Image (cartoon, helix red, strand yellow):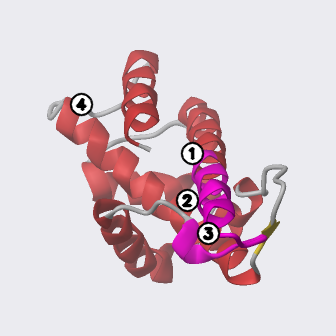
Amino acid sequence: MATIHRLEKMFRRAGDLALDKSDLERLENFLRRKVQDLVLRGEANAKANGRDVVEPWDLPVTKGLQETIHRFRQIDAELQLTDYLSGLTALPPTDLAIGDNTGARLPELAGGLCLALAETFRITDPDLRNPAARDWDRAYRLFDVLL
């Protein structure tokens, strides 16, 4: 099954949403930005604690994001999106080393962000079926405020 079809399936399950190929670029941009933001905050946390390696507990993962990561793991067992997400979670340039365990968690973090994004679309517009550019912009702004 092609990656876009697996992503479509995940978004249908998470928010009864339909994605098309134009949404794929928006999704990839969203994931790169948010993973980078989380890693940069993790770096600041590691520095504040006098360490030179970013560990998983340095990443600012909220309770809600942790829950979506857990749900992603269950969905990923069937859809196998981890390899695709690994390609999107290239590490941003940082002053500190990224621990192996931290790097290994980034694809699941991206998967959790995917589910959180789909749920955000549903919350902001319960009747939404196919997100338009304005819906993506609204979601970007919300995540920028919260993460």
Q: CA distance from mark 2 to mark 1?
A: 8 Å
- Whether the residues at callouts 1 and 4 have beta carbons within 8 Å, the answer is no
SS for callout 2: helix
For marks 3 and 1 on the same chain, the one whose residue lies earlier in the sequence? 1
- Whether the residues at callouts 2 and 1 have beta carbons within 8 Å, the answer is yes
Of circles 1 and 4, which is in front? 1
SS for callout 4: loop
| Residue 128 numbered tag | 4
| Amino acid at pointer 1 | Lys
In the rendered image, residue 34, in percent from the top left (x then y), is placed at 57, 45
Note whether residue 29 is visible.
yes
Note whether residue 9 is visible.
no
Residue 46 highlighted magenta (yes or no): yes
Label 4: few (<14), some or many (≥20) within 10 Å? some
Q: CA distance from mark 3 to mark 2?
A: 25 Å
Could you tell me which residue is drawn at 71 percent across and 54 percent down? 88
| Residue 2 numbered tag | none
Magenta extent: 37-58
For marks 1 and 4 on the same chain, the one whose residue lies earlier in the sequence? 1
Q: Quadrant of residue 28?
A: top right
Q: CA distance from mark 1 to mark 4?
A: 23 Å
Residue on which disc 3 sits: 49
